[in-house]
Image (cartoon, rainbow, N blue to C red):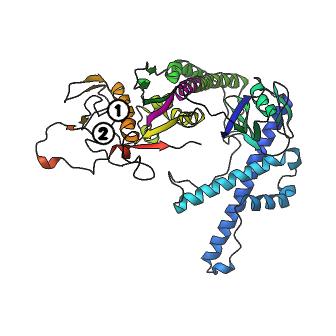
Amino acid sequence: MRVVQAYRFALDPTPRQVAVLASHCGAVRVAFNWGLAQVKANLAQREAERSYGIPEDQLTPALSWSMYGLRKRWNQVKDEVAPWWAGNSKEAYACGLARLTDALSNWRDSKSGKRKGPKVGFPRFKTKRRAARSVRFTTGTIRLDGHSHVVLPVLGRIKTHEPVTELARLLTDGGARIASATVRWQEGRWHVSFTVHTERAVATPARPDAVLGVDLGIKTLAVFSDGRPPVPNPRHLNNAMRKLRRLSRAVSRKRGPDRRTRQQPSQRWQRANAARNRAEYRVAALRRDGIHQLTTSLARTYGTIVVEDLNVAGMIRNRRLARALSDAGFGEIRRQLTYKTGWNGGRLLVASRWFPSSKTCSSCQAVKTKLPLRVRTYVCDGCGLSMDRDENAAPNLAALVERTVAGSGPETRNGRGADHKTPPGGAGGHETSTPHRTPTARIRRGPSPTPGESLKILETQ
């Protein structure tokens, strides 16, 4: 199975190499800002000519937004714009122009409706302080040297903090090929990520016929449908808040940078800020490591995994839950399960966002009309079942797969497999609800979805 996989290593560059890395990242920013200035000037000139009544066919020719056009124009003026350009790899300038091309394409597609999701704004100039420092290499000398060194264009041989033997073995055997390398300043140090085209052996999960429903939550990170012990929420950020508050107070008491007066930070401020950053980086590393262990274990064990299509972006708008939701990492769990199930021969199925997994009784399939989030125990009015709401939701996800995939109905009715209504009885059971004063007080919002309409299969390559 041919896949695209990334390998990331922490670098240990010398002071001279750090300066060269910073110069390359600055070159990316300069090329991006130059191209954006050219595009905005061309758009403004054409708009001004339209306001003068000049016909469209007589306007200033539109500037090409393609990578080829911008790079050709850059090569014509680079001696004037950046006389120092020869000190960096040509890939740095190509990287900045490529990012500008992608940003302009995203804005144009979003404006025309071709790109779905939130609206994408017009690109803005990158500043030296706020722009992410990274550069991507696609050509030139990109290879591994020994057990703990990498070689990059112009930068030369750079030592790594960890061995690169695993990737070196794949390259030596001929089963992998490096397509690109991206160097980025992240979490207080320089990292290099290799995009590798490699062959992975076709794997089979330990239990290929097993179906596992996974219900994610804040109180308990993951609850499973097969009786597997739930995974408690480690709350890494919450546990580190006391230390982070103390470190933040220490930073605020030092003389920090001031952009208005051009005041430079003191050495004490820099040391205090570095200590605070290390504490934040540790929280992120612990969260990432825990999620990787969880998703790898599930993908290697179960043939079918079912999760919910959670509206994480909407959930974090709740200011009372935003920090806890962000600390749990629901989106990262689903992202990792997406590709890890494909690598291990399984599949990931995503239940519709409107499927009432928590409101449905896992015993008799009765559906409650309402179940507020503050109610943590599910009590069925039909059969009397009483259990934790998360432990009740996980079996419903697994049962949904059994009724849909093993049944005769179609898996999806439309491309997304989503039904924007969640009427009572959506899981196929009978309805239990509180009595109403008048029959007209109850409004049906739409037809009940079939089990197949509440599920979609996430295709993986």
Packing grade of label 2 (10 A; few <14, some 14-19, many >=20) is many
Q: Tag on residue 396?
A: 1
Residue 164 in the image, given as x and y percentages of width and height: 77, 26
Q: Quadrant of residue 134?
A: top right
Give the answer, above or below, for where 279 lies relative to 32.
above
Three-letter code for the amino acid on which mark 1 is drawn: Asn
Res. 409 in view: yes
User: Across the whole image, how many numbered discs are drawn on residues?
Assistant: 2
Are the residues flagged by discs 2 and 1 in contact, CB closer than 8 Å? yes
Element type at mark 2 = loop
Quarter of the picture holding the C terminus: top right
Residue 432 in the image, given as x and y percentages of width and height: 20, 36
Q: In the image, 386: left or right of 319?
A: left
Residue 275 in the image, given as x and y percentages of width and height: 65, 21
Packing grade of label 1 (10 A; few <14, some 14-19, many >=20) is many
Per the image, is 268 magenta?
no
Tell me what residue is drawn at x 42 percent, y 25 percent: 224
- Magenta range is 289-310
Q: In the image, 93: left or right of 414?
A: right
Q: In the image, 330: left or right of 450?
A: right
User: Residue tagged by mark 2?
Assistant: 427
